[in-house]
Image (cartoon, rainbow, N blue to C red):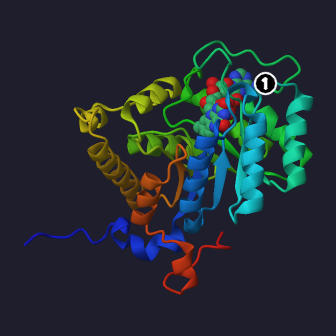
């Protein structure tokens, strides 16, 4: 008779669901009316899952400043979601960055994802701080804390930031960001969970105690994912390429595989003690919704009907 492994927490996920698992969703600001519709459809679908927060990215070089602000403001006024605005140091003076932060504070935004950003010439080109600007994310974090008592999340890199000389440098930088006021790190996406846990061990050994929330990228499009990964310094394992091989013209199967791959990844993380997840949604709800369902999250209307406990107000 087959023996079932009943000890795995992922086997009790329904019971863990709303009590233990917390998720956040990342969106990017839309460029066109069509993209705007797609974004708001995704937000409407994901909102009932009661994420801890939803974040909106800031385009390279501040190119989406107005669009990021407008999206964050609309989330704040038209939904019950808690928005977090991404903000970078690139292409702006300190005064300009401060003005963006103050504008967020004034409309009621209290959570910022504080980043350095990448050079306008593209990832991999030499980084030159803007004259008169904040040079690094740790400088931005310190400045934001002076402007308001923002909740501040920062970036972390399980496989090392591509421009850092060593993991030690990355840990020093993360420690500086925490000392300056960051209370959460969200990781670059990764596909090998061991890389995340090796990084977590290093972070804890360095005495850094803030949550290191894994960033999960469901593979909506394998070719695009491979491109993102090259830029981000994230490894695309051969087994992942193999799972999507031969499916270029088969979108339906690709989506099923993507859900299976992401489910395998998050269940393994749950089984190894992870309770918080940040999803890179690419402004599409379906895969993320399915993965959250697997994680035991159910729409708030069910919670309101008393079927499952609500996470609203949970830590
Ligand atoms: C969760 C997440 C969200 C993101 N969102 C966005 C976004 O919305 N918009 C966007 O443009 N990009 C975004 N990025 C990408 C990010 O801007 C790039 O990865 C960038 O290269 C690093 O940003 P950082 O905040 O980690 O920078 P930093 O922490 O400043 O580190 C960047 C590099 O500089 C080095 N460094 C840091 N401080 C010092 C110092 N004092 N002296 C010398 N070297 C130093 C570090 O070792 C590292 O190599 C995001 C990344 C993640 C993981």
Which residue appears farthest toward the front when viewing the image? 33
Closer to us: 168 or 211: 211
Closer to us: 158 or 39: 39
Give the image location of residue 296, x and y in percent. 44, 69
Q: Above or below — where is 224 with respect to 114? A: above
Classify 10 Å Cα crowding around label 1: few (below 14), some (14-19), many (20 and above): some
What is the count of numbered marks?
1
Q: Above or below — where is 182 with respect to 162? A: below
Give the image location of residue 19, x and y in percent. 53, 74
**Quadrant showing the C terminus:** bottom right
Closer to us: 44 or 256: 44
Give the image location of residue 131, x and y in percent. 85, 16
**Quadrant showing the N terminus:** bottom left
Task: Kindly indicate the quadrant of the structure image that contains residue 206.
Answer: top right
CB at disc 1 and ligand 1 closer than 8 Å:
yes
User: For mark 1, what is the residue?
Assistant: 135
Image quadrant, ligand 1: top right
Task: Kindly indicate the quadrant of the structure image that contains residue 128.
Answer: top right
Who's the residue at 92% across and 30% down the image? 95
Instruction: Confirm whether residue 109 shows in the render.
Output: yes
Give the image location of residue 209, x and y in percent. 64, 51
Query: What secondary structure is marked by label 1?
Result: loop
Q: Above or below — where is 206 with respect to 312? A: above
């Amino acid at each position: 008779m087959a023996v079932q492994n009943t000890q795995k927490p992922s086997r009790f996920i329904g019971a863990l669901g709303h009590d233990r698992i917390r998720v956040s969703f990342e969106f990017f600001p839309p460029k066109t009316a069509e993209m705007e519709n797609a974004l708001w459809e995704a937000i409407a679908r994901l909102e009932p899952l009661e994420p801890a927060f939803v974040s909106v990215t800031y385009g390279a070089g501040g190119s989406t400043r107005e669009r990021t602000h407008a999206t964050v403001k609309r989330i704040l006024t038209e939904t019950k979601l808690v928005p977090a605005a991404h903000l970078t140091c690139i292409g702006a003076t300190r005064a300009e960055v401060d003005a963006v932060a103050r504008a967020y504070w004034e409309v009621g935004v209290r959570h910022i994802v504080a980043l350095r950003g990448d050079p306008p010439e593209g990832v991999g080109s030499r980084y030159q701080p803007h004259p008169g600007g904040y040079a690094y994310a740790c400088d931005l974090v310190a400045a934001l804390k002076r402007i308001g008592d923002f909740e501040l999340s920062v970036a972390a890199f399980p496989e090392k930031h591509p421009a850092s000389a060593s993991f030690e440098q990355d840990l020093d930088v993360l420690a500086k960001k925490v000392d300056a006021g960051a209370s959460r790190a969200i990781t670059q996406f990764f596909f090998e969970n061991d890389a995340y846990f090796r990084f977590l061990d290093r972070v804890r050994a360095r005495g850094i105690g803030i949550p290191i929330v894994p960033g999960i990228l469901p593979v909506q499009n394998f070719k695009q994912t491979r491109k993102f990964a090259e830029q981000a310094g994230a490894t695309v394992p051969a087994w992942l390429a193999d799972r999507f091989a031969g499916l270029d013209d088969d979108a339906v199967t690709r989506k099923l595989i993507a859900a299976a791959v992401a489910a395998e990844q998050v269940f393994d993380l749950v089984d190894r003690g992870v309770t918080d997840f940040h999803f890179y949604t690419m402004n599409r709800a379906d895969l993320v919704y399915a993965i959250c369902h697997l994680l035991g999250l159910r729409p708030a209307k069910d919670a309101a009907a008393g079927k499952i406990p609500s996470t609203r107000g949970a830590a």
